[in-house]
Image (cartoon, rainbow, N blue to C red):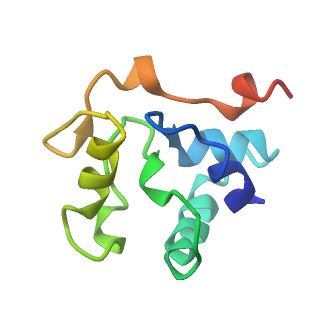
Amino acid sequence: MVFEVVKLIPKGRVTTYGMIANYLGAKRSSRMVGWAMNQSHKLEGIPAHRVVNRQGLLTGKMHFSTSTEMEELLFSEGVQVKENQIVDFNKIVWDPAIELEI
């Protein structure tokens, strides 16, 4: 279910582990979402680079092929990153509970 939500994140937007967990009805399970995201790199079509922590930090970047791949993918979609943090995070964050109207 985590991967299905991640596939819905629009290009140029990001969401958080906690927002995904909340949307799936497991509000306190952001770490479980993180564990699922660690496995996403073995699959095709999962835009894992669009999932960050609640402060907009690129905490999952160590799971990409290179230390800069996550930032590069975000940049290619128009997302600005400075010192491993999303610039204007509150403006581009995508909350599935709001966007998908549960």
Image-based side of 72 in relation to 24, left or right = left
Residue lying at the far bottom of the rendered structure: 42
Residue 3 image offset from top left, x and y in percent: 68, 61
Residue 24 image offset from top left, x and y in percent: 79, 47
Image-based side of 66 in relation to 89, left or right = left
Residue at 36% from the left image edge and 40% from the top image edge: 77
Residue lying at the far front of the rendered structure: 76
Residue at 61% from the left image edge and 69% from the top image edge: 36
Residue lying at the far top of the rendered structure: 91
Residue lying at the far right of the rendered structure: 102
Frontmost residue, 24 versus 45 = 45
**Residue 28 appears in view:** no
The C terminus: image quadrant:
top right
Residue at 54% from the left image edge and 62% from the top image edge: 34
Frontmost residue, 51 versus 28 = 51
Residue 27 image offset from top left, x and y in percent: 71, 43
- Picture mark count: 0
Q: In which quarter of the image is residue 46?
A: bottom right
Residue at 71% from the left image edge and 25% from the top image edge: 99
**Residue 7 appears in view:** yes
Residue 26 in the image: above or below residue 101? below
The N terminus: image quadrant:
bottom right
Frontmost residue, 44 versus 50 = 44
Image-based side of 97 in relation to 86, left or right = right
